Image (cartoon, coloured by chain):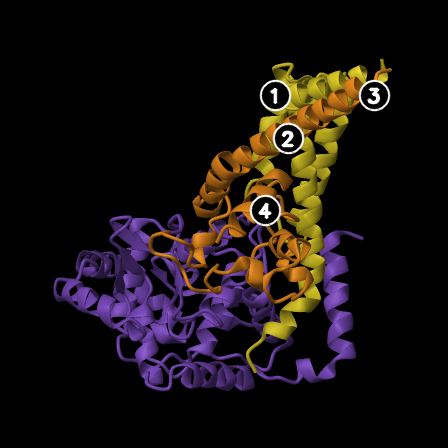
Protein backbone atom coordinates (compact mmCIF):
# COMPACT_ATOMS: atom_id res chain seq x y z
CA UNK A 1 0.00 0.00 0.00
CA UNK A 2 1.24 3.44 -0.96
CA UNK A 3 2.16 5.25 2.22
CA UNK A 4 0.97 8.68 1.00
CA UNK A 5 -2.39 7.28 0.00
CA UNK A 6 -2.54 5.60 3.41
CA UNK A 7 -1.82 8.89 5.18
CA UNK A 8 -4.61 10.61 3.24
CA UNK A 9 -7.00 7.80 3.93
CA UNK A 10 -6.11 7.89 7.64
CA UNK A 11 -6.80 11.63 7.86
CA UNK A 12 -10.07 11.12 6.02
CA UNK A 13 -11.09 8.43 8.44
CA UNK A 14 -10.35 10.63 11.41
CA UNK A 15 -12.21 13.53 9.88
CA UNK A 16 -15.21 11.40 9.00
CA UNK A 17 -15.29 9.74 12.38
CA UNK A 18 -15.09 13.06 14.18
CA UNK A 19 -17.81 14.48 11.98
CA UNK A 20 -20.06 11.56 12.70
CA UNK A 21 -19.33 11.75 16.41
CA UNK A 22 -20.01 15.48 16.40
CA UNK A 23 -23.26 14.95 14.56
CA UNK A 24 -24.35 12.30 17.03
CA UNK A 25 -23.36 14.38 20.03
CA UNK A 26 -24.96 17.45 18.59
CA UNK A 27 -28.25 15.74 17.86
CA UNK A 28 -28.33 14.51 21.45
CA UNK A 29 -27.48 17.97 22.73
CA UNK A 30 -30.42 19.35 20.77
CA UNK A 31 -32.68 16.70 22.21
CA UNK A 32 -31.69 17.67 25.76
CA UNK A 33 -31.92 21.41 25.21
CA UNK A 34 -35.15 21.74 23.33
CA UNK A 35 -37.14 18.59 23.96
CA UNK A 36 -36.24 17.22 27.39
CA UNK A 37 -35.69 20.55 29.09
CA UNK A 38 -39.09 21.85 28.06
CA UNK A 39 -40.70 18.52 28.98
CA UNK A 40 -38.83 18.52 32.28
CA UNK A 41 -40.10 22.00 33.02
CA UNK A 42 -43.66 20.99 32.22
CA UNK A 43 -43.40 17.99 34.57
CA UNK A 44 -42.04 20.23 37.31
CA UNK A 45 -44.91 22.71 36.97
CA UNK A 46 -47.85 20.35 36.27
CA UNK A 47 -50.19 19.84 39.22
CA UNK A 48 -50.93 16.23 38.39
CA UNK A 49 -47.24 15.36 37.90
CA UNK A 50 -44.26 16.77 39.78
CA UNK A 51 -46.18 19.81 41.00
CA UNK A 52 -42.83 20.96 42.45
CA UNK A 53 -44.17 24.53 42.32
CA UNK A 54 -46.62 23.61 45.08
CA UNK A 55 -43.74 23.76 47.56
CA UNK A 56 -40.74 25.33 45.78
CA UNK A 57 -40.14 28.62 44.00
CA UNK A 58 -38.83 27.76 40.52
CA UNK A 59 -37.72 29.97 37.68
CA UNK A 60 -40.72 31.97 36.39
CA UNK A 61 -43.38 29.72 37.98
CA UNK A 62 -46.39 31.72 39.19
CA UNK A 63 -47.54 31.64 42.83
CA UNK A 64 -45.03 29.15 44.18
CA UNK A 65 -45.40 27.53 47.59
CA UNK A 66 -42.71 27.75 50.26
CA UNK A 67 -42.73 24.47 52.18
CA UNK A 68 -39.38 23.68 50.56
CA UNK A 69 -36.43 25.85 49.55
CA UNK A 70 -36.34 27.66 46.17
CA UNK A 71 -34.84 25.46 43.45
CA UNK A 72 -31.76 27.49 42.56
CA UNK A 73 -28.12 26.69 41.81
CA UNK A 74 -28.91 23.02 41.75
CA UNK A 75 -25.45 22.04 40.41
CA UNK A 76 -23.88 23.65 43.42
CA UNK A 77 -26.28 22.16 45.93
CA UNK A 78 -26.31 18.70 44.38
CA UNK A 79 -22.92 18.13 42.73
CA UNK A 80 -23.76 14.43 42.78
CA UNK A 81 -26.56 13.70 40.32
CA UNK A 82 -27.44 10.48 42.13
CA UNK A 83 -28.09 12.43 45.34
CA UNK A 84 -30.53 14.75 43.56
CA UNK A 85 -32.24 11.82 41.90
CA UNK A 86 -32.49 10.01 45.25
CA UNK A 87 -34.02 13.10 46.87
CA UNK A 88 -36.76 13.12 44.25
CA UNK A 89 -37.20 9.34 44.17
CA UNK A 90 -37.70 9.00 47.93
CA UNK A 91 -36.78 11.86 50.26
CA UNK A 92 -38.02 9.89 53.27
CA UNK A 93 -35.12 7.48 52.86
CA UNK A 94 -32.82 10.19 54.20
CA UNK A 95 -35.33 11.71 56.63
CA UNK A 96 -38.45 9.73 57.55
CA UNK A 97 -40.24 12.97 58.50
CA UNK A 98 -39.63 14.70 55.16
CA UNK A 99 -42.78 16.28 53.74
CA UNK A 100 -41.56 15.68 50.18
CA UNK A 101 -43.62 12.94 48.50
CA UNK A 102 -41.60 9.86 47.41
CA UNK A 103 -42.16 10.58 43.72
CA UNK A 104 -40.30 7.55 42.36
CA UNK A 105 -40.98 4.98 45.03
CA UNK A 106 -44.70 5.72 45.13
CA UNK A 107 -45.03 5.78 41.36
CA UNK A 108 -46.13 9.43 41.17
CA UNK A 109 -43.54 9.92 38.43
CA UNK A 110 -41.88 7.23 36.32
CA UNK A 111 -38.11 6.87 35.89
CA UNK A 112 -37.97 8.74 32.57
CA UNK A 113 -39.98 11.60 34.01
CA UNK A 114 -37.58 11.86 36.95
CA UNK A 115 -34.62 11.87 34.53
CA UNK A 116 -36.16 14.76 32.62
CA UNK A 117 -36.85 16.66 35.84
CA UNK A 118 -33.26 16.16 37.04
CA UNK A 119 -32.03 17.42 33.68
CA UNK A 120 -34.25 20.48 33.94
CA UNK A 121 -33.30 21.20 37.55
CA UNK A 122 -29.62 21.24 36.60
CA UNK A 123 -30.39 24.02 34.13
CA UNK A 124 -31.51 26.22 37.06
CA UNK B 1 -11.55 -4.09 3.99
CA UNK B 2 -11.80 -3.76 7.72
CA UNK B 3 -11.57 0.03 7.91
CA UNK B 4 -14.32 0.56 5.39
CA UNK B 5 -16.57 -1.77 7.31
CA UNK B 6 -15.76 0.12 10.49
CA UNK B 7 -16.70 3.44 8.92
CA UNK B 8 -19.88 2.03 7.51
CA UNK B 9 -20.71 0.61 10.89
CA UNK B 10 -20.15 3.93 12.60
CA UNK B 11 -22.23 5.76 10.04
CA UNK B 12 -24.91 3.14 10.30
CA UNK B 13 -25.00 3.38 14.06
CA UNK B 14 -25.31 7.13 14.09
CA UNK B 15 -28.04 7.12 11.47
CA UNK B 16 -29.90 4.35 13.16
CA UNK B 17 -29.46 5.30 16.79
CA UNK B 18 -32.83 6.97 17.23
CA UNK B 19 -35.19 5.02 14.96
CA UNK B 20 -33.66 1.66 15.87
CA UNK B 21 -34.95 1.93 19.42
CA UNK B 22 -38.60 1.89 18.41
CA UNK B 23 -38.94 -1.61 16.98
CA UNK B 24 -37.21 -2.94 20.10
CA UNK B 25 -39.88 -1.34 22.28
CA UNK B 26 -42.64 -2.62 20.09
CA UNK B 27 -41.15 -6.05 20.41
CA UNK B 28 -41.34 -5.73 24.16
CA UNK B 29 -44.92 -4.60 24.08
CA UNK B 30 -45.66 -7.33 21.55
CA UNK B 31 -44.54 -10.07 23.94
CA UNK B 32 -47.03 -12.83 24.25
CA UNK B 33 -49.15 -12.36 27.35
CA UNK B 34 -51.06 -15.36 28.55
CA UNK B 35 -54.69 -15.05 29.59
CA UNK B 36 -54.06 -16.79 32.92
CA UNK B 37 -51.16 -14.45 33.61
CA UNK B 38 -53.45 -11.43 33.38
CA UNK B 39 -56.18 -13.04 35.45
CA UNK B 40 -53.78 -13.92 38.23
CA UNK B 41 -52.22 -10.43 38.14
CA UNK B 42 -55.70 -8.95 38.67
CA UNK B 43 -56.34 -11.36 41.55
CA UNK B 44 -52.99 -10.44 43.11
CA UNK B 45 -53.83 -6.73 42.78
CA UNK B 46 -57.19 -7.22 44.47
CA UNK B 47 -55.55 -9.12 47.34
CA UNK B 48 -52.95 -6.36 47.77
CA UNK B 49 -55.70 -3.73 47.76
CA UNK B 50 -57.65 -5.62 50.42
CA UNK B 51 -54.56 -5.91 52.60
CA UNK B 52 -54.07 -2.16 52.33
CA UNK B 53 -57.73 -1.53 53.15
CA UNK B 54 -57.50 -3.78 56.22
CA UNK B 55 -54.53 -1.74 57.38
CA UNK B 56 -56.68 1.40 56.92
CA UNK B 57 -54.15 2.63 54.39
CA UNK B 58 -55.62 2.11 50.93
CA UNK B 59 -54.60 4.67 48.32
CA UNK B 60 -57.03 6.73 46.29
CA UNK B 61 -56.56 5.23 42.84
CA UNK B 62 -55.87 1.54 43.52
CA UNK B 63 -59.46 0.45 43.08
CA UNK B 64 -59.80 2.45 39.86
CA UNK B 65 -56.65 0.83 38.48
CA UNK B 66 -58.10 -2.61 39.17
CA UNK B 67 -61.41 -1.60 37.60
CA UNK B 68 -59.58 -0.35 34.50
CA UNK B 69 -57.48 -3.53 34.39
CA UNK B 70 -60.65 -5.67 34.43
CA UNK B 71 -62.17 -3.55 31.69
CA UNK B 72 -59.05 -3.81 29.51
CA UNK B 73 -58.95 -7.55 30.14
CA UNK B 74 -62.55 -7.83 29.00
CA UNK B 75 -61.73 -5.89 25.83
CA UNK B 76 -58.85 -8.24 25.02
CA UNK B 77 -56.17 -5.63 25.80
CA UNK B 78 -54.13 -8.05 27.84
CA UNK B 79 -50.87 -6.15 27.84
CA UNK B 80 -52.60 -3.01 29.15
CA UNK B 81 -54.60 -5.03 31.67
CA UNK B 82 -51.43 -6.66 32.96
CA UNK B 83 -49.64 -3.35 33.35
CA UNK B 84 -52.59 -1.75 35.21
CA UNK B 85 -52.96 -4.75 37.50
CA UNK B 86 -49.27 -4.67 38.31
CA UNK B 87 -49.46 -0.96 39.13
CA UNK B 88 -52.42 -1.61 41.43
CA UNK B 89 -50.64 -4.49 43.16
CA UNK B 90 -47.60 -2.30 43.72
CA UNK B 91 -49.81 0.41 45.23
CA UNK B 92 -51.40 -2.08 47.59
CA UNK B 93 -48.00 -3.36 48.70
CA UNK B 94 -46.62 0.15 49.16
CA UNK B 95 -49.66 1.19 51.20
CA UNK B 96 -49.19 -1.77 53.55
CA UNK B 97 -45.49 -0.97 53.83
CA UNK B 98 -46.42 2.63 54.60
CA UNK B 99 -48.88 1.56 57.30
CA UNK B 100 -46.30 -0.69 58.94
CA UNK B 101 -43.68 2.04 58.89
CA UNK B 102 -46.10 4.67 60.19
CA UNK B 103 -47.34 2.43 63.02
CA UNK B 104 -43.98 3.28 64.59
CA UNK B 105 -42.86 6.48 62.85
CA UNK B 106 -45.88 8.67 63.75
CA UNK B 107 -44.75 8.98 67.35
CA UNK B 108 -41.69 10.98 66.37
CA UNK B 109 -43.96 13.73 65.00
CA UNK B 110 -46.12 14.22 68.09
CA UNK B 111 -45.86 17.78 69.39
CA UNK B 112 -44.47 17.58 72.88
CA UNK C 1 -53.59 -12.93 61.40
CA UNK C 2 -54.70 -10.02 59.29
CA UNK C 3 -52.75 -6.87 58.59
CA UNK C 4 -54.67 -4.69 61.00
CA UNK C 5 -53.84 -7.04 63.86
CA UNK C 6 -50.18 -7.10 62.92
CA UNK C 7 -50.12 -3.32 63.00
CA UNK C 8 -51.93 -3.21 66.34
CA UNK C 9 -49.46 -5.69 67.75
CA UNK C 10 -46.54 -3.64 66.48
CA UNK C 11 -47.97 -0.48 68.02
CA UNK C 12 -48.60 -2.26 71.29
CA UNK C 13 -45.07 -3.62 71.31
CA UNK C 14 -43.74 -0.15 70.82
CA UNK C 15 -45.89 1.29 73.60
CA UNK C 16 -44.52 -1.31 75.96
CA UNK C 17 -40.94 -0.81 74.92
CA UNK C 18 -41.12 2.98 75.14
CA UNK C 19 -43.25 3.50 78.24
CA UNK C 20 -42.60 7.23 78.20
CA UNK C 21 -45.13 7.57 75.39
CA UNK C 22 -48.12 6.06 77.13
CA UNK C 23 -47.70 8.37 80.09
CA UNK C 24 -48.08 11.50 77.96
CA UNK C 25 -51.65 12.32 79.02
CA UNK C 26 -54.13 14.08 76.73
CA UNK C 27 -53.75 17.16 78.90
CA UNK C 28 -49.94 17.12 78.46
CA UNK C 29 -50.56 16.82 74.71
CA UNK C 30 -52.96 19.77 74.70
CA UNK C 31 -50.62 22.03 76.64
CA UNK C 32 -47.71 21.15 74.34
CA UNK C 33 -49.87 21.62 71.23
CA UNK C 34 -51.01 25.10 72.21
CA UNK C 35 -47.51 26.05 73.39
CA UNK C 36 -46.10 25.02 70.01
CA UNK C 37 -48.23 27.56 68.14
CA UNK C 38 -47.64 30.20 70.79
CA UNK C 39 -43.90 29.80 70.21
CA UNK C 40 -44.22 29.66 66.40
CA UNK C 41 -46.37 32.79 66.19
CA UNK C 42 -45.65 34.82 69.35
CA UNK C 43 -47.73 37.78 68.10
CA UNK C 44 -50.89 35.72 67.64
CA UNK C 45 -52.95 35.28 70.83
CA UNK C 46 -54.17 31.70 71.35
CA UNK C 47 -57.79 32.94 71.30
CA UNK C 48 -57.31 34.08 67.67
CA UNK C 49 -56.83 30.54 66.30
CA UNK C 50 -60.58 29.94 66.17
CA UNK C 51 -60.46 32.14 63.04
CA UNK C 52 -58.42 29.57 61.13
CA UNK C 53 -56.07 30.98 58.52
CA UNK C 54 -57.34 34.52 59.22
CA UNK C 55 -55.45 34.35 62.50
CA UNK C 56 -52.24 34.26 60.44
CA UNK C 57 -53.17 36.07 57.22
CA UNK C 58 -53.82 39.81 57.48
CA UNK C 59 -54.70 40.30 53.81
CA UNK C 60 -57.19 37.47 53.52
CA UNK C 61 -58.70 38.55 56.82
CA UNK C 62 -60.12 41.78 55.41
CA UNK C 63 -61.95 39.94 52.65
CA UNK C 64 -63.28 37.45 55.15
CA UNK C 65 -64.53 40.16 57.47
CA UNK C 66 -66.47 41.65 54.56
CA UNK C 67 -68.08 38.26 53.91
CA UNK C 68 -69.00 38.02 57.59
CA UNK C 69 -70.97 41.27 57.34
CA UNK C 70 -73.64 39.37 55.41
CA UNK C 71 -72.98 35.86 56.67
CA UNK C 72 -73.69 33.23 54.01
CA UNK C 73 -74.51 30.67 56.72
CA UNK C 74 -77.42 32.67 58.09
CA UNK C 75 -79.96 30.71 56.09
CA UNK C 76 -78.60 27.44 57.48
CA UNK C 77 -78.91 28.74 61.06
CA UNK C 78 -82.54 29.82 60.49
CA UNK C 79 -83.42 26.58 58.76
CA UNK C 80 -81.70 24.64 61.54
CA UNK C 81 -83.77 26.40 64.18
CA UNK C 82 -86.99 25.49 62.34
CA UNK C 83 -85.93 21.87 61.98
CA UNK C 84 -84.81 21.71 65.58
CA UNK C 85 -88.17 22.88 66.93
CA UNK C 86 -90.35 20.79 64.61
CA UNK C 87 -91.71 17.82 66.60
CA UNK C 88 -91.13 14.26 65.35
CA UNK C 89 -94.11 12.12 64.29
CA UNK C 90 -94.23 10.69 67.81
CA UNK C 91 -94.62 14.19 69.27
CA UNK C 92 -91.23 14.47 70.97
CA UNK C 93 -88.47 16.86 69.89
CA UNK C 94 -84.68 17.11 69.63
CA UNK C 95 -84.58 19.03 72.89
CA UNK C 96 -85.27 15.82 74.80
CA UNK C 97 -82.04 14.27 73.50
CA UNK C 98 -79.65 17.02 74.59
CA UNK C 99 -78.42 18.70 77.75
CA UNK C 100 -79.90 22.15 78.28
CA UNK C 101 -82.63 21.07 75.81
CA UNK C 102 -80.24 21.57 72.92
CA UNK C 103 -79.05 25.18 72.59
CA UNK C 104 -75.53 26.02 73.74
CA UNK C 105 -74.08 22.50 73.95
CA UNK C 106 -71.81 22.39 70.89
CA UNK C 107 -68.69 22.74 73.08
CA UNK C 108 -69.36 19.38 74.78
CA UNK C 109 -68.96 17.43 71.53
CA UNK C 110 -67.52 15.05 70.61
CA UNK C 111 -68.04 13.10 73.79
CA UNK C 112 -67.25 9.55 74.78
CA UNK C 113 -70.27 7.35 75.43
CA UNK C 114 -69.11 4.72 77.93
CA UNK C 115 -72.17 2.55 77.38
CA UNK C 116 -71.75 2.38 73.63
CA UNK C 117 -67.98 2.41 73.97
CA UNK C 118 -67.52 4.96 71.20
CA UNK C 119 -67.11 8.63 70.40
CA UNK C 120 -70.37 10.47 69.72
CA UNK C 121 -70.12 13.59 67.58
CA UNK C 122 -72.84 16.22 67.44
CA UNK C 123 -73.97 15.02 64.00
CA UNK C 124 -74.17 11.43 65.20
CA UNK C 125 -76.08 12.52 68.32
CA UNK C 126 -78.63 14.29 66.10
CA UNK C 127 -79.14 11.16 64.01
CA UNK C 128 -79.31 8.90 67.07
CA UNK C 129 -82.00 11.20 68.44
CA UNK C 130 -83.95 10.83 65.22
CA UNK C 131 -83.66 7.05 65.24
CA UNK C 132 -84.70 6.69 68.86
CA UNK C 133 -87.80 8.68 67.94
CA UNK C 134 -88.66 6.50 64.97
CA UNK C 135 -87.33 8.87 62.30
CA UNK C 136 -84.83 7.87 59.63
CA UNK C 137 -81.28 9.18 59.97
CA UNK C 138 -80.20 12.07 57.73
CA UNK C 139 -77.38 11.37 55.33
CA UNK C 140 -74.21 13.03 56.53
CA UNK C 141 -73.45 16.35 54.95
CA UNK C 142 -77.11 16.71 53.94
CA UNK C 143 -78.44 20.26 54.12
CA UNK C 144 -80.73 19.27 57.01
CA UNK C 145 -77.97 17.87 59.16
CA UNK C 146 -75.62 20.77 58.43
CA UNK C 147 -78.41 23.22 59.22
CA UNK C 148 -79.15 21.57 62.57
CA UNK C 149 -75.46 21.54 63.37
CA UNK C 150 -75.14 25.19 62.28
CA UNK C 151 -78.00 26.17 64.58
CA UNK C 152 -76.49 24.28 67.51
CA UNK C 153 -73.09 25.90 66.92
CA UNK C 154 -74.68 29.34 66.61
CA UNK C 155 -76.44 28.98 69.96
CA UNK C 156 -73.10 27.94 71.51
CA UNK C 157 -71.02 30.83 70.24
CA UNK C 158 -68.62 32.11 72.85
CA UNK C 159 -68.79 28.92 74.96
CA UNK C 160 -65.40 27.38 75.74
CA UNK C 161 -64.69 24.05 74.08
CA UNK C 162 -64.80 21.48 76.85
CA UNK C 163 -64.20 17.99 75.49
CA UNK C 164 -63.82 15.43 78.26
CA UNK C 165 -61.68 12.32 78.08
CA UNK C 166 -62.87 10.20 80.98
CA UNK C 167 -60.53 7.79 82.68
CA UNK C 168 -61.95 4.90 80.67
CA UNK C 169 -59.73 2.59 78.62
CA UNK C 170 -62.13 2.91 75.69
CA UNK C 171 -62.01 6.71 75.75
CA UNK C 172 -58.23 6.78 76.00
CA UNK C 173 -57.95 4.27 73.16
CA UNK C 174 -60.26 6.41 70.99
CA UNK C 175 -58.19 9.50 71.75
CA UNK C 176 -54.95 7.65 71.04
CA UNK C 177 -56.29 6.30 67.73
CA UNK C 178 -57.31 9.82 66.66
CA UNK C 179 -53.87 11.08 67.61
CA UNK C 180 -52.18 8.31 65.62
CA UNK C 181 -54.37 9.11 62.61
CA UNK C 182 -53.43 12.78 62.88
CA UNK C 183 -49.67 12.19 62.90
CA UNK C 184 -49.51 9.28 60.41
CA UNK C 185 -48.45 9.79 56.84
CA UNK C 186 -50.91 8.31 54.39
CA UNK C 187 -51.73 8.13 50.72
CA UNK C 188 -49.60 8.08 47.61
CA UNK C 189 -48.36 11.59 48.46
CA UNK C 190 -47.34 10.45 51.96
CA UNK C 191 -48.64 13.34 54.06
CA UNK C 192 -49.78 13.43 57.69
CA UNK C 193 -52.31 16.04 58.87
CA UNK C 194 -49.48 17.46 60.99
CA UNK C 195 -47.18 17.83 57.96
CA UNK C 196 -49.37 20.66 56.69
CA UNK C 197 -51.20 22.00 59.73
CA UNK C 198 -48.48 21.88 62.39
CA UNK C 199 -44.99 22.20 60.96
CA UNK C 200 -46.11 24.00 57.79
CA UNK C 201 -48.80 26.21 59.33
CA UNK C 202 -48.52 29.73 57.92
CA UNK C 203 -46.66 28.53 54.82
CA UNK C 204 -48.01 28.34 51.28
CA UNK C 205 -48.86 25.40 49.01
CA UNK C 206 -49.05 27.30 45.73
CA UNK C 207 -51.52 30.08 46.59
CA UNK C 208 -53.09 28.18 49.50
CA UNK C 209 -52.12 29.52 52.89
CA UNK C 210 -51.96 26.65 55.39
CA UNK C 211 -53.90 27.16 58.60
CA UNK C 212 -52.97 25.90 62.06
CA UNK C 213 -54.80 22.86 63.42
CA UNK C 214 -55.32 24.66 66.69
CA UNK C 215 -58.87 26.02 66.49
CA UNK C 216 -59.78 23.95 63.42
CA UNK C 217 -62.91 22.35 64.92
CA UNK C 218 -64.25 25.57 66.52
CA UNK C 219 -66.08 26.95 63.49
CA UNK C 220 -67.75 24.04 61.72
CA UNK C 221 -70.02 23.59 59.89
CA UNK C 222 -68.61 26.04 57.38
CA UNK C 223 -70.14 27.75 54.37
CA UNK C 224 -67.69 27.22 51.51
CA UNK C 225 -68.06 29.79 48.73
CA UNK C 226 -66.20 27.37 46.46
CA UNK C 227 -69.02 24.80 46.77
CA UNK C 228 -71.86 27.23 47.46
CA UNK C 229 -73.01 25.25 50.50
CA UNK C 230 -72.42 24.28 54.10
CA UNK C 231 -69.92 21.51 54.73
CA UNK C 232 -69.22 19.48 57.85
CA UNK C 233 -65.90 18.92 59.59
CA UNK C 234 -65.86 15.32 58.39
CA UNK C 235 -66.44 16.44 54.84
CA UNK C 236 -63.30 18.56 55.24
CA UNK C 237 -61.42 15.53 56.60
CA UNK C 238 -62.65 13.60 53.56
CA UNK C 239 -61.26 16.26 51.22
CA UNK C 240 -57.88 16.40 52.93
CA UNK C 241 -57.43 12.63 52.91
CA UNK C 242 -58.42 12.49 49.24
CA UNK C 243 -55.99 15.31 48.41
CA UNK C 244 -53.03 13.29 49.70
CA UNK C 245 -54.30 10.50 47.43
CA UNK C 246 -55.48 8.14 50.13
CA UNK C 247 -58.88 6.48 49.95
CA UNK C 248 -61.06 8.68 52.18
CA UNK C 249 -63.11 7.19 55.02
CA UNK C 250 -66.85 7.80 55.19
CA UNK C 251 -68.14 10.75 57.16
CA UNK C 252 -68.83 9.71 60.78
CA UNK C 253 -66.62 6.65 60.37
CA UNK C 254 -64.96 5.57 63.60
CA UNK C 255 -61.65 6.86 62.18
CA UNK C 256 -62.93 10.41 61.66
CA UNK C 257 -64.85 10.46 64.95
CA UNK C 258 -61.69 9.52 66.83
CA UNK C 259 -59.74 12.11 64.86
CA UNK C 260 -62.32 14.75 65.79
CA UNK C 261 -62.07 13.66 69.43
CA UNK C 262 -58.30 14.20 69.46
CA UNK C 263 -58.38 17.38 67.39
CA UNK C 264 -61.14 19.04 69.39
CA UNK C 265 -59.45 18.15 72.66
CA UNK C 266 -56.36 20.02 71.42
CA UNK C 267 -58.57 23.15 71.16
CA UNK C 268 -60.07 22.85 74.64
CA UNK C 269 -60.33 26.29 76.23
CA UNK C 270 -60.83 28.10 72.90
CA UNK C 271 -64.36 29.26 72.10
CA UNK C 272 -66.98 27.90 69.73
CA UNK C 273 -67.46 30.40 66.88
CA UNK C 274 -69.31 28.31 64.32
CA UNK C 275 -70.81 28.30 61.85
CA UNK C 276 -68.04 29.77 59.73
CA UNK C 277 -67.48 31.11 56.22
CA UNK C 278 -64.54 30.19 54.03
CA UNK C 279 -63.65 30.81 50.40
Palette colour of chain B: yellow
Q: To which quarter of the image does residue A113 belong?
A: top right
Tell whether A44 sits left or right of C224: right
| Residue to which mark 4 is pinned | B59
Tell whether C17 sits left or right of A64: right
As drawn, the chain in orange is A
Establish whether labels 2 and 1 are both on one chain.
yes
Establish whether labels 2 and 4 are both on one chain.
yes
Q: Name the chain letter of the residue that bears numbered label 2.
A: B
Residue density around tag 2, few if under 14, some if 14–19, many if 20 or more, within 10 Å:
many
Q: Position of residue C39 (x, y in %)?
A: 44, 86
Q: CA distance from mark 3 to mark 2?
A: 64 Å
| Residue to which mark 3 is pinned | A3
Task: Specify the label residue B72 is tagged with.
Answer: 1
Closer to viewer: mark 2 or mark 4: 2
Callouts 4 and 3 close, C-beta under 8 Å: no
Establish whether labels 4 and 3 are both on one chain.
no
Q: Name the chain letter of the residue that bears numbered label 1.
A: B
Amino acid sequence: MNSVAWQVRKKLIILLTSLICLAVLDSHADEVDDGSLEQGKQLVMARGKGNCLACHAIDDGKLPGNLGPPLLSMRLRFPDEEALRAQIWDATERNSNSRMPPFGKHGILNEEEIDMIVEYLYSL
Amino acid sequence: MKLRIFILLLAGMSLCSAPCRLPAQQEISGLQVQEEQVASAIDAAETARQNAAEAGAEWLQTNDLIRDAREAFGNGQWQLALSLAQQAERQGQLAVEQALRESVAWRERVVR
Amino acid sequence: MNMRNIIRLLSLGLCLSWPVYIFGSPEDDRIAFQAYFQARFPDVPISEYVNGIYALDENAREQWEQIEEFPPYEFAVENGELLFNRPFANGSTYSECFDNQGPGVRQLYPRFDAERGEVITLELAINLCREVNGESAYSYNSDELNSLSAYMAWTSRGNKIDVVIPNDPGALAAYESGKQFYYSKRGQLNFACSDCHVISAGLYVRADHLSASLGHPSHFPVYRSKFGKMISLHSRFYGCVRDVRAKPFEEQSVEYRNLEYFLTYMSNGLIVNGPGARK
